[in-house]
Amino acid sequence: MTIQKFKPGYVQRSLEEKAQISEDGFPISVLDLSPISSGVPESQALYNSISLAQFVDRLGYRRYWVAEHHSIPSVASSAPEMLIAHAAMLTSRIRVGSGGIMLPNHAPLRIAESFKVLEALHPGRIDLGVGRAPGSNPITALAMRRSKERLESDHFPEELAELIGLASGRLPQDHPFATVRAIPTDVPLPPIWILGSTRDGALIAAEFGLGFAFAHHINPHEAQIATETYCTHFRASAWLDRPRIIVAASVICADTNTEAERLAKTVELAWVRLRTGKPAPLSSPEEAAEYSYNAWELELARASRAVYFVGDPTNISERLLHLAAQAHADEIMVTTNIFGHAERLRSYELLAEAFHLVPEPAIAGH
């Protein structure tokens, strides 16, 4: 089979068109990890997530995705399907989905059923982002998968093919589950996006002809390589006739660069704690500023700055548009994990203004 080389829409545009995009608006979305702040009940993070979904829906963001993580003290998004259902019910315009479901943690049939039900209840507004990482530490992953064999093996392409086959009722006749149907059968599986932070994920997305969401916030150094690999090897499919790329980036936006730097203290400490095997709820900027780093931790804190964008709206929007051009992205997805719900909402509000998003029309009398 001849593999056609594609380039997605944004990279094909002229410099003049790209400059106009910055004036007219560029699609941006939200990736939410339901961050847990110190001194706040863990369950409050879930209420905050629903509040955020409603807020960015009104602001004009394109998507709101929730992640899957387990047994991490700073992250409450352990059951994304449930958050998706609740968020979709309480929003009206925004697409709601997973960023993502970690497919090896679950039976493909279960995911097919869950997301077909979500699509039936919220037609045209659900996305299915799938990944292959455990979203947890090894012992928690073992608790999820129930066997060392499943933990140590990588059958993601086969599991993905099974998910698609079960959802469409088109598994090969000799497949052991060929007679199984994912109910409801009259509802399609939502659009699938492959999440990845390396070329491996890019190749899988390209081979299946699916959208590719690159995790710049995990691996900022391979964004361009991974997305170019995806475009080069993309095969048109029943899902997509051309490549579609989302790049997810970690962002801290505030009214001033000084305030953004203050908020970033929380993220630096969270990064160090995660990388040293001591994750904890997010500390306030004041608590983080008082933390005494040893030499190795200080290096980790400094290295973390390559992973996230910090600044005022003009600073951030210019850098994100540059990233979009470099990574051939059709869309930027922003994750903001800082202390304080009000500060997080303000960060997304400032970005919406900088990217000229179109807010929901105000209702008279409200």
Image (cartoon, rainbow, N blue to C red):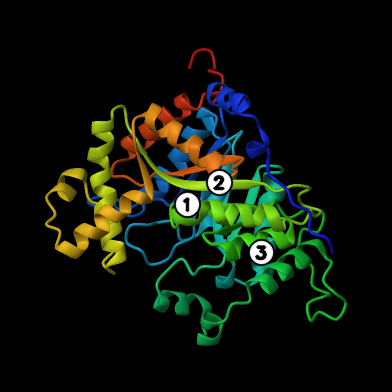
Name the spot of residue 26 as percent of width and height, x first.
56, 31
The single residue placed furthest to the front in the displayed view is 15
Question: Residue visible at 23% across and 59% down?
Answer: 299
**Is 12 situated left or right of 35 in this image?**
right
**Is 297 situated left or right of 238 in this image?**
left
* Element assignment for label 2: loop
Verify CB contact (< 8 Å) between mark 1 and mark 2: yes
Can you identify the residue that label 2 sits on? 327
**Rendered-image quadrant of the N terminus:** bottom right
Residue 167 in view of the camera? yes
Q: Quadrant of residue 194?
A: bottom right
Name the spot of residue 94 as percent of width and height, x first.
59, 37
Among numbered discs 3 and 1, the one appearing first in the sequence: 3
Among numbered discs 2 and 3, the one appearing first in the sequence: 3
Q: Which of marks 2 and 3 is in front?
A: 2
Question: Residue visible at 83% across and 65% down?
Answer: 169
Question: The residue under label 3 is which amino acid type?
Answer: Ile
Question: The residue under label 1 is which amino acid type?
Answer: His
Can you identify the residue that label 3 sits on? 204
Can you identify the residue that label 1 sits on? 216
Mark 3, Cα crowd under 10 Å, few <14 / some 14-19 / many 20+, is many
